[in-house]
Amino acid sequence: MPVMATVFSMIIAGELPGRFVHQDDEVVAFLSIAPLTPGHTLVVPRAEVDDWTTLDPALWSHLTGVAARIGVAVRTAFDAPRAGLVIAGFEVPHAHVHVFPARGLADFDFANARPDTPAAELDDAHRRLLAALD
């Protein structure tokens, strides 16, 4: 039985829209459509691997390096004292890390995710993050 592509694989392939802030041969990063805070970015390996603990160590190292670069950028773009990093792994069966501007522990609560965030707000966060990465 063929494996169905994850929503992340569909975004990576261009079958679904994504606001990308990083792309290379192994890893991509794009804004979450249900952000915890403005600028919430998902860093995702191109390979469809469900559990981050099974990623090749070199790929994991590269992915976390990209996440650190995104973390610096979200702090800059959104004037945040910290960059949050979360590995949840239950929402989509495709390994990924969440990177977002954080001002306190409440920013880590997925109950506060905003799936109704207006496109204009996501577009603004995308522009700000791209400028900080430049």
Image (cartoon, rainbow, N blue to C red):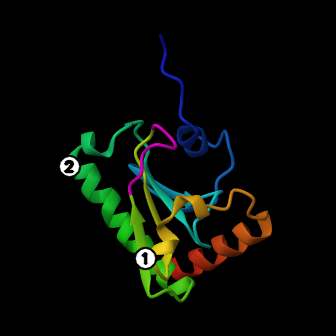
Amino acid type for the residue under numbered disc 2: Pro
Give the camera-side residue of 111 and 58: 111
Residue at image location 56% in from the left, 84% down from the top: 77
Residue found at x 58% / y 39%: 7
Q: Residue at x 58, y 74 (%)?
A: 130
In the image, residue 103 sits, relative to residue 32, either above or below, namely below
Q: Contact, CB < 8 Å: mark 2 with mark 1?
A: no
Badge 2 element: helix
Disc number for residue 83:
1
Disc 2 crowd, CA 10 A, few/some/many (<14, 14-19, 20+): few
11 to the left or right of 48:
right
Q: Is 41 rendered above or below residue 9?
A: below
Crowd rating for badge 1 (residues with CA inside 10 Å; few <14, some 14–19, many 20+): many
Q: Name which residue lies at 20% across and 49% down.
A: 57
Q: Who is closer to the viewer here, 102 or 13?
A: 102
Q: SS at mark 1?
A: strand
For the record, the magenta segment spans 87-93
Is 94 magenta? The answer is no
Using the numbered discs, state the Cα–Cα distance from disc 2 to disc 1 in whole angstroms.
23 Å
The residue identified by callout 2 is 57
Q: Is residue 78 above or below residue 50?
A: below
Judge from the rendering whether residue 78 lies leftward or rightward of residue 61; answer left or right.
right
Q: Residue 88 magenta-drawn?
A: yes
- Amino acid found under the numbered disc labelled 1: Ala
Q: Position of residue 101 (x, y in %)?
A: 50, 77
Q: For residue 86, which quarter of the picture?
A: bottom left
